[in-house]
Each structure stands twice: as structure tokens, then as C-alpha cells.
Image (cartoon, rainbow, N blue to C red):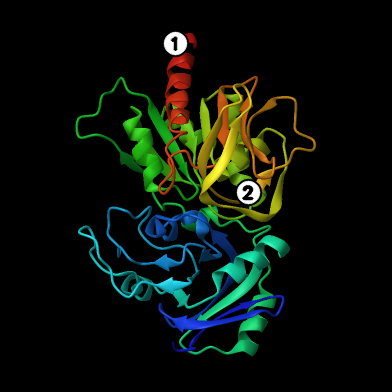
Amino acid sequence: MKKNGLLALADGTLFWGESVGAEGCFSGEVVFNTAMTGYQEILTDPSYAGQIISFTYPHIGNIGVNEEDAESGQMWTGGVVMRELSKTSSNWRAKGDLPEALKKQGIIAISGIDTRKLTHILRSRGSQHACVMGGKADPVFALQQARSFTGLEGKDLAKEVSCAHSYAWTAKNPDLQQPHVVVLDFGVKSAILQKLHKSGCHLTIVPAQMSAEEVLKLQPDGVFLSNGPGDPAACLYAIATIRTLLEKNMPLFGICLGHQLLALASGAKTVKMENGHHGSNHPIQELSSGKVFISSQNHGFAVQDCGLPECLEVTHRSLFDGTIAGITRNDKPAFSFQGHPEASPGPHELHLLFHQFTTLMKSYAKTH
């Protein structure tokens, strides 16, 4: 194995491996993902902007890549760390292999890393600032880059991954009786749009920084607050928009970053997590019924329990660490979920939340 790839942690730990992606370096926060499938969906999830992904599953790249499994138009992660890159890609749907795609999109990737050791470090010490290098690995420079990274707190990355212009997502022959949902795009995944569409909605996707007044001009029946990267508290424009939409009693449904933004607009606070949740096997409990659901998760910030305003009720909690995984407004038609009910990759047990949103919009329309 060529030793031309390097992952340097800010604490001084070095992992040498083989460069299997683009040449260069990237500094960011390194996190581990426990999903056993869906590496392409993970790599193209805009929520990973600013991060380096370490896969705990040992073999990556065995089914190649294709256009259908992409969650956006590009890979957003800055770097990829693998135990072993598969030497062959074998799948009837494959249109290319992973190393090709990584190089084409300029993503630094290294293979041959002891990802069990890396995961142990991240679990015991928390998510680390790091630098990943490919092609020409310089440990001194890599450590400097890792230690100079300022972290994700205070960084608004949602506006960087959002769409530049509004666009429609509708059926060929849209039913005008279906709810019209405006999607505030903070880094929305394709699977979420597909699930909203299959739930009976026709969609208009709009940039993250669109004002509440512009959103309301589109005459939506409801507004969806999407997933996305970065620190939710830095998205002041989104918090202001959501606060106005709440005042107008607009039905709202938030996922991941959208969940955190709804909480902030309601008077709650968010906090940077030590490890974050990244994977597709996370147990979540619905408090009203006691039922446990297995969910897909991808977030490094959480809604803070301390000082939760009276207008918010906790609906779901993580059974890993007890963090808030779902909230609802008790005075407004709005709710949110911290995980990814659309999965991709992951289990489909929480698809019912999309039905809950369509039911909320229809019932609210009948009474107002």
C-alpha cells in the first residue's frame, strides 16, 4: 500500500494510508458514520459540508456509483476515510466507480486506515478537528491545518449549499387539490423531496435566505424546513423567517437543521454535541406511546433541554444519550424531528411523520 494519504487530528494523532481520491488537502471536523450501506447517499448529503467522513463499515465502494442514488448534484463532504476501498465495483446499476467520482469532484479520500482506532478516539474524545491529505502527505503542514481549523460553531453553511433560485417539484399532471408545500432549502436531500411528493404534496423549493414575506406570496399550505450543515444559531435570517411564519400560523415541519431552527425560532437554544449522531441504526422513543423506532441520524448540534420554553413539548428522545429528537408547538401548527425519517440510507419506520404533516395541513385548512 502506498503511504501517500494522511489524516492528521488536532491532538497530534496521525493515520497514514493510501490516497484514493483527489490530490490536495481539506481541513474540517472528522466524524464517523455507522451505516452499513448507502455510502453514495451519505457522500452527496449536503449536511456533511465542512466535515470529513470516516466510515465504520470496513468495505466501501463495492457497488460503484450511479445518478439515481445521489442525494444532491454533488458530493459535499470535504474528505473521506475508509478501512478498505473495494478493488472492484460490481452492480448492474453502477455507472462508474467511487475513486473516479471522488477524483472528478475533487474530494480527498484515503484508504487503509484503522477506522476502529479512529472511531474509539472520536467516541472517547469527541469529534476532532482534522486535516486529510492525498497525493503529497506532509505531517507538519497537516497538523498545522488541523489545529488552525476554527470549528463549525458560528458557521452558517446552509446558505452555501442552498439552491440559488426557486424551482418546482411537481407531478406531470399535478392535482391542484394537493397541498402546496414551500421547501426552505438549507441543504435538502432528494429523498426528502421524493417523500413529500409521494405523500401527496406539490413542491416549490426556495433558497435558504428567502424572506417570510416572499414565502407567503407563494401561497403555501405548509412550509417544510429542510436538513442542512453548520451551526443553526448562525442562521439568523432563517430564524427570523420561521418566527414570522409561526406568527402567521403557517403549518411547519422541520427535519434535522430545520428541527433546530424551529426550536430557536420558538425561544429554545441549541448546543454543539461532543460526538454527534451519524448513522442509520439510532433508537428513538416516541414519548406519547412509548414506541421505539430505529432511525437514520446525521447531526452535530442538538436542541438544549435546559430552558426549553413552555410553547414547546418534547415528542421524541434518543435512547443513545437522551437528547431531544422531536418537538411540537402546543400553540401553533408546527413540529419537527431531529433525525431523517426519509432514511436514504436507513430504516423507513418514521415515514409516518410525512403523513402527519399532510394531515396537519389539511386539518388546518379546514378550520381556517
Q: Secondary structure at mark 2?
A: helix
Left or right: where 48 falls relative to 314:
left
- Where is residue 241? Give x, y as percent: 58, 38
x then y, percent, for residue 116: 58, 68
Kind of residue sitting beneath label 2: Pro
Residue drawn at 49 percent across, 16 percent down: 364
Q: Which residue is mark 2?
A: 232
Front one among 130 and 14: 14
Q: Quadrant of the N terminus?
A: bottom left
**Would residue 45 be found to the left or right of residue 266 on screen?**
left
Secondary structure, mark 1, is helix
Residue 329 vertical placement versus 126 (above, below)? above
Disc 1 vs disc 2: Cβ atoms closer than 8 Å? Answer: no
Residue for point 68% across, 26% down: 313
Is 271 placed above or below 6 here? above
Judging by the rendered image, the residue that carries numbered circle 1 is 366
Give the residue at x 67% y 61%: 123
Residue 187 placed where, x, y %? Answer: 47, 51
> x, y percentage for residue 38?
39, 55
